[in-house]
Each structure stands twice: as structure tokens, then as C-alpha cells.
Image (tube, rainbow, N blue to C red):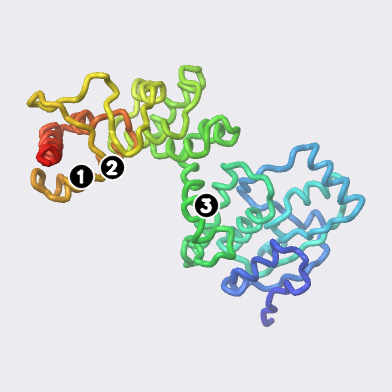
């Protein structure tokens, strides 16, 4: 039997039509697409669905609407080798139909849909159709979509501006995917809104042990919240190889900020001094990198190492001096030499 192309010509559903417009249907060799009436018993749910079912009240409202007006938007299902039909879109409509004991429902049936293609279709339709989605649900949706595209040999994210995941929002997609690296308790806090989204993204770079410490401190009330700036600072410490323990979390979260922009300042009233006792003046990241690029005092390997570490320190640990930070990683002499060279030259003018 020859394959019949998917029939979306009569669809009034923009979300479903988008599958064809995005090129997924043609690329994946999907056939079928006609709307048919299927018995409830013939349908089964998509496995490991990360999206919430509607609340009982909202599901009852949907059921009442279907009972009065009929099912306006058909389900989307794929034919399985077993002869059953797996729901790719419309789980809440399916559950609402069961509430009113509806025996049959209209379904747009797709054929020749493998697991990777099914994952992409499920993610795309949910991202397009759902007005409300928890951060964790959106994170799972993006993850499912990206992984499905990889399995199909496609770029992880499309280049076109037609898809839900586009070149223009790649950074945001990556941020959502980072949430899946959070321990469940912190991810729940992001969903509940008690942990800011950007804070959750930055805390995802901390080890599971460190995250568990943060969760314990939040749960016991020792710290009340973690603003984005504090989370970014904790991320900088973790990515620089500094162990995140209870003391460091409390110190960062409860410290008073003196955010002056790009200049690193001391957290103490006493001005920082080098090993020779002379005052070390604050240095901006741009000034420091300029000095690093001259390579007078450090080797190429040291330059590469320090450039990244100091970038993290100076962007995210505003109240630490360069000397304080580099002393902590055993680079005090190099730091003094760099700072002294920069400001000795400035004093000459």
C-alpha cells in the first residue's frame, strides 16, 4: 500500500497545522492525518508525560463545555503496531470525555510515526497549545523536543523563526533545560514561585550536595530567599571549583551588597594591601584583562586559568577584591604583580 501524505488541508487548528508548516511531517515521512472517530477504549496515554492534568474543577468545566458544544478540537494520536492509538495531544480533552462517559472521540490519526517523531510532535503541540505551563513542564517540553530532534539527526534547535524553539530564544531554552539539573525540592520551589527562575538556573550549576544544603537552609528558615544576584554569586564560586558548604551559602546570601557595576570592591572598611604593604586599588575586569593580555608576569597556561577564574569572580563576587579571590586559589604573588604593574603605570601620568 502506498503512503498517503498527511491531510491537514481541512484543519482549523493552528497548533496542528504548524507541524506541517515546520516541515516535520514531510521530513519524518508521517502519513495519514484524517479525522476519524475512535472509541475511548482504543486510546492510550503517551508515556512519561511531564504535563499536569487539569485541576478537578477545570476538568469539570471542560467536560461541561464538551457536553454542551461537542469536542471542538480533535485529539491527535498515532497508530501503534499493537493496533491501539497513542494520544500525542489532547490528554485533558480525553479525560474530560471520560468524565461525561463519552464512548467515542474525534481524533486526527497519524501513521508511520516513530518514537522520536512522536516526542517532537508531543512537545511542539503542548508548547503551542498550553497557555499556562509550570517552569518544570516547559523545561521538560524543551528537553523532549531537543532530544527528539537529535535522534532524528536534526539540529538541536531549528534556525527558522516559525518553531516554538527558535534562534531568537535559544538562550532561554537553555536556561529552562538547566532547571532539570536542580534537585526536586528546589525545582518545586521554582514552580511555586518561592525561588526565582534565574536563581534556579544559576543554582543548577552547583553540585547536588550543595543544592541539598541550600534546600535545607531554606526549609529551616536559616535563609529566607535567594535573590538572583546571590544565586549568580554562588554559581561563580561553584564553577571556580570552590566547595559550597553551609557556611559559604549563609555568608553569600546574608552579605550586604555594594554593587558598583564593573569595579570590584572590598567587603571590609580597611583597604586591601599587597604583600609589600602598599594599598591595592580596585581594578575593573576590563583593566585586568588588558593587563593579562600583555603576559608580562604569568605564563600562557596561567593566563588562561586566571582569565576565566577572575572573570567569574569579578562579575559575580562584587565584594571580593582581586587579591582576596586569587589568594584563595594560591595566586597571591601573581595578583600583586598584576595590580602593582597596572597602577604604577597609571600613577606615572
Side of 8 relative to 206 (left or right): right
What residue lies at 39% left-to-right and 39% top-to-bottom? 205
Q: Secondary structure at mark 2?
A: helix
Q: Which residue is mark 1?
A: 305
**Quarter of the rendering occupied by the N terminus:** bottom right
Which one is nearer the viewer's eye here, 9 or 74?
9
Residue 54 horizontal/vertical position (percent): 73, 42
Tell me if residue 334 can be seen.
no
Q: Nearer the viewer, mark 2 or mark 3?
A: 2
Q: Which residue is mark 3?
A: 143
Q: Nearer the viewer, mark 2 or mark 1?
A: 2
Mark toward the start of the polypeptide (2 vs 3):
3
Residue 311 circle label: 2
Which one is nearer the viewer's eye here, 96 or 216?
216
Q: CA distance from mark 2 to mark 1?
A: 10 Å
Q: Secondary structure at mark 3?
A: helix
Residue 248 horizontal/vertical position (percent): 34, 24
Residue 302 horizontal/vertical position (percent): 15, 44
Q: CA distance from mark 1 to mark 3?
A: 32 Å
Which one is nearer the viewer's eye here, 349 or 41?
349
Q: Residue furthest front?
A: 349
Amino acid at each position: 500500500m502506498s503512503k498517503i501524505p498527511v491531510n491537514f488541508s481541512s484543519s482549523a487548528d493552528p497548533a496542528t497545522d504548524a507541524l506541517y508548516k515546520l516541515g516535520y511531517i514531510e521530513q519524518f515521512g508521517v502519513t495519514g492525518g484524517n479525522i476519524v472517530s475512535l472509541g475511548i477504549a482504543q486510546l492510550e496515554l503517551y508515556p512519561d508525560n511531564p504535563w499536569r492534568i487539569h485541576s478537578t474543577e477545570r476538568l469539570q468545566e471542560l467536560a461541561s463545555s464538551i457536553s454542551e458544544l461537542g469536542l471542538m478540537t480533535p485529539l491527535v494520536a498515532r497508530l501503534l503496531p499493537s493496533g491501539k492509538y497513542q494520544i500525542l495531544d489532547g490528554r485533558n480533552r480525553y479525560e474530560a470525555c471520560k468524565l461525561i462517559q463519552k464512548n467515542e472521540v474525534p481524533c486526527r490519526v497519524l501513521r508511520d510515526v516513530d518514537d522520536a517523531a512522536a516526542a517532537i510532535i508531543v512537545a511542539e503541540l503542548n508548547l503551542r497549545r498550553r497557555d499556562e505551563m509550570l517552569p518544570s513542564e516547559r523545561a521538560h517540553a524543551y528537553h523532549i523536543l531537543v532530544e527528539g530532534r537529535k535522534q532524528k539527526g536534526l539540529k538541536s534547535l531549528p534556525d527558522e523563526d516559525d518553531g516554538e524553539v527558535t534562534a531568537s530564544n535559544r538562550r532561554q531554552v537553555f536556561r529552562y533545560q538547566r532547571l532539570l539539573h536542580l534537585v526536586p525540592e528546589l525545582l518545586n520551589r521554582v514552580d511555586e514561585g518561592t525561588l526565582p527562575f534565574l536563581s534556579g538556573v544559576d543554582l543548577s550549576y552547583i553540585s547536588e550536595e550543595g543544592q541539598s544544603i541550600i534546600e535545607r537552609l531554606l526549609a529551616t528558615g536559616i535563609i529566607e530567599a535567594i535573590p538572583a544576584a546571590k544565586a549568580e554569586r554562588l554559581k561563580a564560586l561553584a564553577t571556580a571549583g570552590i566547595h559550597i558548604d553551609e557556611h559559604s551559602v549563609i555568608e553569600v546570601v546574608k552579605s550586604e551588597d555594594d554593587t558598583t557595576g564593573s569595579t570590584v570592591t572590598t567587603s571590609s572598611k580597611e583597604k586591601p594591601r599587597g604583600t609589600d604593604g602598599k594599598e591595592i586599588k580596585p581594578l575593573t575586569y576590563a583593566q585586568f584583562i588588558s593587563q593579562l593580555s600583555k603576559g608580562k608576569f604569568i605564563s600562557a597556561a596561567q593566563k588562561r586559568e586566571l582569565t576565566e577564574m577572575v572573570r567569574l569572580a569579578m562579575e559575580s563576587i562584587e565584594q571580593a577584591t582581586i587579591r582576596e579571590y586569587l589568594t584563595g586559589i594560591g595566586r597571591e604573588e601573581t595578583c600583586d604583580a598584576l595590580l602593582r604593574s597596572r597602577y604604577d603605570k597609571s600613577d606615572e601620568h
